[in-house]
Image (cartoon, rainbow, N blue to C red):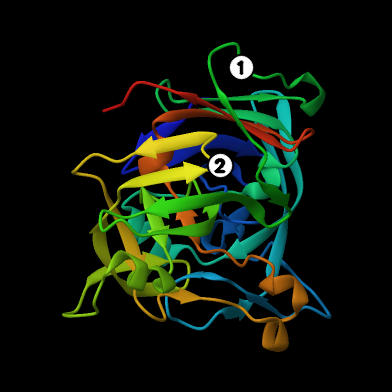
């Protein structure tokens, strides 16, 4: 499947039996595949028992929004890739911030069904049956990760230029254009103060404030994958309240299972070829030349 890589975001174009040709943001950080409300129109369903969705993610607006779904049947050429229920979400603000038109999001539920290889350098995603998944022939790292219906988490150690380091459970998120985004509890370790207004970022829950800082190194799974940062490598650390976290007490047990310390985004992932082996619950990582 051809990919477009623009503004450090991945896009692919598929066909749906009801909605026609749709351009989707490829986002392993979003639990469910999404169809934009502008595309779904009145072809939506509501649940008698589930009225709201609680979204854990970047931004400071309310986490609850109306729960609506629609049926999708997504194809590439003659191959059926995803058939079932997709969330219906108003993506007007997301499209504005991306500066790229999208009709929805190809989410983590897609990657859990297939053996999928994302190749940033060649702008290709290869999709195979899970039973046909094999480790790549080139030199690669194998990451076990923590696989769930919510996403893929990687146990890591982040080290800062001041010599301090801290363990982090990081969400692999191809929907993020950052190299690394860390939650606010890492500010003390990095030696960051909250002076001034900070940078303004955006996410599914609106805008938030954060700061850039330097990174020394990132180790994933006891050094199975290691990145030694250059002097120009910067990462983002959110300010207090930058990440809205749904809590089981007010939003239900299922909505609070995505606890993590931050995300690994495309600024880091674009240097790799990633194969998601959903049957063995493994991620194979092959380094690739830096891309333009």
Q: Is residue 249 left or right of residue 120?
A: right
The quarter of the picture where residue 61 lies is bottom left
Query: Where residue 172 sits in the image (x, y, percent)?
Result: 54, 48
Above-or-below relation of 185 to 251: above
Element type where label 1 sits in the image: loop
Element type where label 2 sits in the image: loop
Point 36% across, 67% down: residue: 189
Q: Which residue is mark 2?
A: 222
The alpha-carbon separation of the residues under discs 2 and 1 comes to 21 Å
Viewer can see residue 104 = no
156, 222: nearer the viewer: 222
Q: Is residue 192 left or right of residue 180?
A: left
Query: Where residue 13 sits in the image (x, y, percent)?
Result: 52, 35
Point 52% across, 61% down: residue: 38
Residue farthest bottom in this picture: 250
Q: Which residue is mark 1?
A: 136
Residue farthest left in this picture: 196
Query: So how many labels did they put on this image?
Result: 2
Point 27% across, 69% down: residue: 191
Query: Where residue 91 sits in the image (x, y, percent)?
Result: 47, 62
Is there a contact, CB below 8 Å, between mark 2 and mark 1?
no
Instruction: For the C terminus, give its image quadrant.
Output: top left
Point 68% across, 49% down: residue: 146
100, 32: nearer the viewer: 32
Packing grade of label 1 (10 A; few <14, some 14-19, many >=20) is: some
Instruction: For the N terminus, give its image quadrant.
Output: top right
Packing grade of label 2 (10 A; few <14, some 14-19, many >=20) is: few
- Tag on residue 26? none
Query: Where residue 219 sits in the image (x, y, percent)?
Result: 47, 43
Front label number (2 vs 1) = 2
Residue farthest front in this picture: 163
Q: Is residue 277 left or right of residue 239?
A: right
């Amino acid at each position: 499947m051809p990919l477009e890589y623009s503004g450090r975001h991945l896009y692919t174009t598929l066909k749906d039996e009801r909605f026609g040709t749709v351009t989707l943001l490829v986002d392993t950080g979003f639990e469910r595949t999404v169809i934009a409300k502008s595309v779904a129109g009145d072809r939506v369903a509501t649940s008698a028992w589930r009225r709201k969705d609680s979204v854990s993610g970047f931004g400071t607006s309310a986490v609850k929004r109306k729960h609506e779904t629609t049926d999708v049947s997504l194809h590439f050429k003659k191959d059926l890739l995803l058939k079932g229920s997709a969330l219906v979400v108003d993506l007007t603000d997301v499209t504005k911030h991306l500066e790229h038109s999208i009709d929805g999001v190809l989410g983590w539920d897609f990657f859990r069904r297939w053996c999928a290889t994302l190749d940033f350098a060649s702008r290709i995603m290869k999709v195979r049956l899970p039973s046909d998944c094999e480790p790549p022939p080139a030199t690669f790292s194998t990451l076990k990760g923590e696989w769930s219906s919510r996403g893929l988490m990687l146990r890591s150690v982040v080290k800062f230029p001041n010599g301090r380091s801290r363990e982090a459970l990081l969400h692999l998120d191809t929907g993020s254009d950052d190299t690394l985004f860390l939650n606010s509890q890492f500010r003390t370790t990095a030696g960051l103060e909250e002076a001034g207004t900070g940078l303004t970022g955006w996410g599914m829950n609106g805008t938030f404030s954060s700061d850039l800082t330097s990174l020394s190194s990132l180790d994933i799974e006891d050094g199975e994958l290691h990145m030694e940062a250059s002097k120009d490598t910067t990462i983002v650390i959110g300010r207090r309240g930058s990440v809205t976290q749904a809590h089981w007490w007010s939003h239900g047990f299922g909505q609070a299972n995505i606890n993590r310390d931050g995300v690994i985004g495309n600024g880091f992932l674009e240097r790799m070829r990633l194969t998601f082996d959903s049957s063995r619950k493994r991620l194979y990582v092959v380094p690739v030349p830096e891309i333009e």
